[in-house]
Amino acid sequence: MRIFTAALATETNTFSSICIDRRAFEASLYAPPGEHPETPTLCTAPITVGRKVCADKGWTLIEGTAAWADPAGLINRQAYESLRDEILDQLKAALPVDAVVLGLHGAMVADGYLDPEGDFLTRIRDIIGPDVFLAAELDPHSHLTAKRVAAANVFVAFKEFPHTDFVARAHDLWRITVETLEGRVKPVMSVFDCRMIDVFPTSRQPMRGIVDKMMAIEAADKDLLSLSVIHGFMAGDVPEMGTKTIAITNGVPEKGKALAQALGMELFARRGTFIMPQIDEKQAIAQALAIPEGPVVIADVWDNPGGGTAGDATVILAEMLKQKVTNAAFGMIWDPIAVEICMAAGAGATIPLRFGAKSAPGTGQPIDGLVTVKAVVPKAEMRFGESIAPFGDAAWIELQGIDIILSSVRVQSYDPSLFTALGLNPLERHILVVKSTNHFHAAFAKIATDILYCSAGSPYPNNPATNPYQRVRRDIWPIMADPHGPNFETS
């Protein structure tokens, strides 16, 4: 067997002012054919898993380019088209192939393309023809458009949020691919539109129980090859934004349709109950100070670079300074210019510095102060599960008893190693502030005495009922109270 694999992925917050060009992919991950590292990034696990699967089977794996950019705003048209065409040309050169297995995210939006993945998959289908198997792994925070479903045979999405299972789901994708190519299964994909948009953290109920139930059904039902929930991505202003469910069966589409609908309606019935409770910055700091032992983690949930924001909001930090909090560490604030200044000054220097809150309204005001540069590290990295997340040149500064990590590459706070990479021991601080909606939870829960979710400022469009959408359909909850009800009308 000859199988082609590649990855092209990012997540687009269409409300973000930070555009993505080719350099953004190169800063996060750009790996030409055969140069992908042994460890996967979030959306490239099909490549690393595919290497092992094909080696074990004695099959030929032809690797194309792998490209991942940390989430931000609109993708530059030339950047998208050049990466797309680079991979398409590699596929054409690899023909004939028996299958194409891809790593995608699913929430890209580019200048001139509201559905880049749909465009990409359709072009691949045109190249390989109707009979070659086409499969892709998706991030659940994506848009499952009709164009994508028409082009691909199989989609498998991560089940967990935080996304701790992207390697496991790549194994599921390859299992289905192998069984299909060896003639043991005939996968049929069924999709149900939940007509809703919500946030589904699997670190708490009720979504924890639903995911466990999904996996139990997969294990028990011999006709079922995979169940997935596409959470949707509320910061993507595109026509088909919303939550969908996928059931892949072995040739029994009616059963798949029923399973996808049952799962989708269970999600709809519990709408509004999934997201973690949030408090403002004043409450978060007061509660953290009242907890006798640390570290207490405060998550700045909506200034999350993983959702396309800058990660430079200073609302929580300003309140900490106002309340004269000490013995706290803040990780991270994105400010490449401030990092450059700190690196020029060097470790041990005390300098006046302005940093943060440069990207957009709702992120607070820049912080001014006399800071001590504690450490500088070029090309810093942190862990994220089985992968590595680079955050570029970085500096550890101290301001009025608060330790702050400044980064030059936007990336959310995945793991305590973001602190230790600079030489700071997070276990020695009473309060840790991180910028992440929920991906931080898997790693930080292991060291935290408590976790507080804080909604501070307005860097992210976090209320779909009031977000200023221009393209999103109106027939979904909470824009419509009950789109499945008797008075439902399409518009």
Image (cartoon, rainbow, N blue to C red):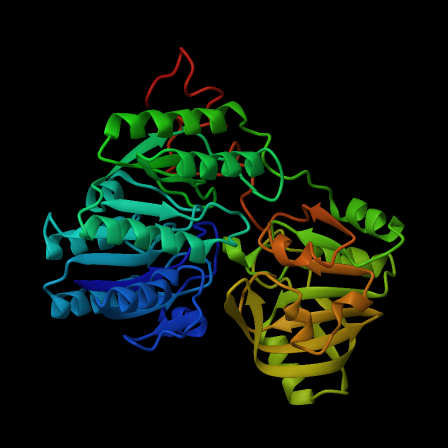
Count of marks overlaid on the render = 0
Q: Quadrant of residue 379?
A: bottom right
The residue nearer to you, when weighing 428 against 216, is 216
Q: Point out residue 280 in the picture as x, y percentages from the top left corner.
A: 73, 44
The residue nearer to you, when weighing 209 against 120, is 209
Relative to residue 199, is residue 47 depicted above or below? Answer: below
* Residue at the (66%, 49%) spot, across then down: 457
Q: Quadrant of residue 462?
A: top right
Q: Point out residue 368 in the picture as x, y percentages from the top left corner.
A: 75, 70
The residue nearer to you, when weighing 351 against 13, is 13
Quadrant of the frame with the C terminus:
top left
* Residue farthest along the top direction in this orientation: 486
Q: Point out residue 435 in the picture as x, y percentages from the top left corner.
A: 63, 57
Q: Quadrant of residue 123?
A: bottom left
* Residue at the (54%, 66%) spot, across then down: 410
The residue nearer to you, when weighing 278 against 130, is 130
* Residue at the (14%, 52%) spot, across then down: 132
Q: Is residue 231 left or right of residue 175?
A: right
Q: Is residue 113 visible?
A: no
Q: Is residue 282 left or right of residue 127?
A: right
Relative to residue 361, is residue 404 depicted above or below? Answer: below
Q: Point out residue 1 in the picture as x, y percentages from the top left corner.
A: 16, 62
Q: Is residue 306 left or right of residue 261?
A: right
Q: Is residue 266 visible?
A: yes
Relative to residue 87, is residue 160 depicted above or below? Answer: above
